[in-house]
Image (spheres, coloured by chain):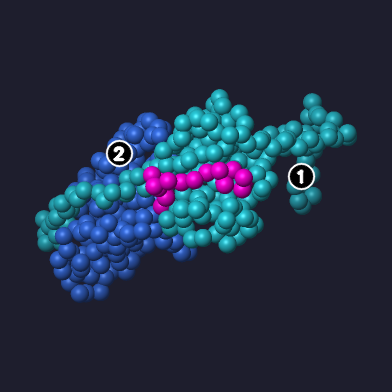
Amino acid sequence: MNDLETMLSDVGRAHSPQPLPDGVIDGDVARGRRALARRRMRQSATRLVVVVALSAGAFVVVAPQGGNAPDTVASPPVTRLDTSVPAPVVAAPAIKLVAYTGEQPAGYTVGTVPAGWEIQGVDNYALVIARRGDPDQEVGSFVGKLVVMLQSKDEGDRTDGTEVSVGSTTGRIVRGDPAMASDGTITPGDMDAARLFFKDSAGHRLVIQAPVALHWSDAQIVEFGESVHANENAEAGVG
Amino acid sequence: MRTPRDEEFRAFVVRSRDGLVRTATLLSGGDRHRAEDLVQTTLTRLYVAWPRVRQADGPDRYARRTLVNALIDEQRRPFWRRERAHADVPDRAVLEHDDDFDQLHQALAQLPAGMRAAVVFRHVHEFSVAETADALNCSEGNVKSQTARGLEQLRAALSGGTPAPTNDAILRSSS
């Protein structure tokens, strides 16, 4: 073995493992959870688009350019929805808030929850509220759920969206936030939820993520936000 | 509340993170911040794909491939965004530095990403040719040629000579 290969080999051996600083592994898990939630949210949005497209019964034939028309014409679908008389669109009612009477979760104090919803789980990073009987019982999945968390340590104050009053302070509601995949690609307006950013009375930078399934107006998101408080056990994510 | 995925992933990170950072530091030419970025990207991808990772031959093998892919993906971007996942990168020596090692890191940094990875896995981690080919997802012949050229360029750089012209072949393209 010559000198260079010896030196390379020495580099591999000249390493003494060190204990990981506090919070590093929690940060890895939190980033993974967020990436997984974003992925599931995108998949959910894609499924919704497909269902809507199929429901509309649209059938489009695109002829190839350059005069090479096909000899046969695509047959119409065997069954097709009659769209000549569109069904009336009925907006789903917003789910009302009711007083929360259960045990308070560690990290947060909750004053109200949506009627028929329950606290599904909580850890240092997020409080997750979901419909009773929600088939998605994974607490790390935020799709279609109401989530309370602290804003990432590495994220600055939001200046976009709509300014709203939250108690004695102001916050911002952002709808259709871009979603970022784990590989860093960003899809504008992909997030199927509204998010309220504000500081509570103790100075915690809170984020409320309300799914569109709640059909909440800005005022209703604020009403929920005003009923939630973080305590010293709540921990901000990173990244 | 921790899920089974969290528990298994956490155990893997406790066991493997230090080694991944060490490899990533070598792959990034001694840049600890960049190495930390690469490891975080790798671990995030592993968490998302965890059901597949745990069924694979071994999470370590999957992690190595993901780390190399993250390195190559990063170099293909027109710019790379630095996202600090925690405020301070652990302030500790990943390698015990001396001048020779610093020079070696600098010389490694001059190699194309795939060639650097071949040299690191083959001669630092002392993987076999087959293991290196598996980690880099390329042929064994490609590993041999890339490591030979990599060593040649490292020797030239460390002796102060002019490195041989760089062959910036992406390993996977010629597998």
**What shade has chain A been given?**
cyan
Q: Is residue B91 above or below residue A114?
A: below
Q: Residue at x 44, y 62 (%)?
A: B80
Where residue B139 appears, as percent x and y from the top left, is: 33, 46
Left or right: where B100 falls relative to B139: left
Chain letter for mark 2, please: B
Instruction: Give the position of the C terminus of chain A as an image quadrant.
Output: bottom left
Asked if the magenta segment contains residue B107, the reply would be no
Report the residue at 51% width, 52% height from top: A200
Position of residue A210 measured from the top left corner of the image (x, y, whole percent): 59, 43
- The chain painted blue is B
Residue A149 rendering spot, x and y as whole percentages: 48, 46
Which callout, 1 or 2, points to the residue nearer the camera? 2
* In this picture, residue B27 sits left or right of residue A35: left
**Circle number at residue A62:** 1
Q: Work out whether residue A196 or residue A9 is closer to the camera in this orientation and state it.
A: A196
Snapshot quadrant of residue A114: top right
Count how many numbered circles sit on residues in the image.
2
At 75% from the left and 47% from the top, the residue drawn is A64
Q: Quarter of the image holding residue B26?
A: bottom left
Residue assigned mark 2 = B12
Q: Is residue A196 visible?
A: yes
Disc 1 to disc 2, how far (Cα)? 50 Å
Name the secondary structure under disc 2.
helix
Image quarter hosting the N terminus of chain A: bottom left
The span picked out in magenta is A221-239
Q: Amino acid at mark 2?
A: Phe
Q: Crowdedness of circle 1 by 10 Å Cα count: few (<14), some, many (20+)?
A: few
Which kind of residue does numbered mark 1 sit on?
Val
